[in-house]
Image: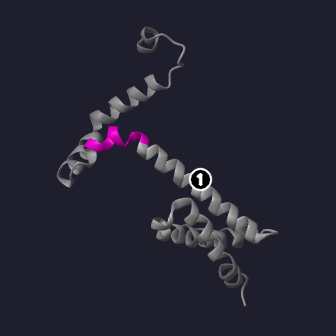
Amino acid sequence: MELSDHLFRREAGRMVAALTRVFGVHNLALAEDVVQDDFCRALELWKFRGVPENPSVWLMATAKNRALDMLRRQRTALSFAPELGWLLESEWTLAPVVEELFAANAIKDDLLRMMFTCCHPRLAEEAKSA
């Protein structure tokens, strides 16, 4: 039996169980998707880097890191949801608003806004706009 088959049979259940505890039972499909993606990533990486000394630990660490990333992404989405909610009101408004946000003039304004955002916070507003 191939190493990947053995690992998947032995570790997938443990990984799905751990991720389901993190994401909740209502997100079981998400936990399964994360596990499947982790195994696919492992098979790709291990072709070039070789199988790690303890592949089970590697897989569980990857799943843990993926869970952290997803939770951070969700936290960020919830933080900015009120600001972005107007974009998502309906499909009729979504496409035109996004189209407008990516217009050439809007992008120029975005670049300027980003330059001001990147100014040192201790600088006075007057100095930032100069």
Q: Of 82 and 20, which appears nearest the observer?
A: 20
x and y percentages locating residue 66 in the rendered image? 59, 58
Q: Is residue 54 left or right of residue 28?
A: right
Q: Quadrant of the N terminus?
A: bottom right
Residue 90: horizontal and vertical position, in percent?
21, 52
As for residue 82 lying within the magenta part, the answer is yes
Residue 79 left/right relative to 85: right
Answer above or below: position of 103 versus 71: above
Q: Quadrant of the C terminus?
A: top left
Q: Residue at x 23, y 48 (%)?
A: 89
- The 10 Å Cα crowd at callout 1, few under 14, some 14 to 19, many 20 or more, is few
Which residue does the numbered mark 1 point to in the structure image? 68
| Residue 48: image location, x then y, percent | 71, 69
Percent from the top left, x then y, of residue 119? 50, 21
Task: Kindly identify the amino acid type of the residue bearing the numbered disc 1.
Answer: Leu
Q: Main secondary structure of the magenta part?
A: helix
Range covered by the magenta-colored residues: 79-86
Residue at horizontal 29 percent and vertical 38 percent from the top = 104
In this view, the residue farthest toward the left is: 92
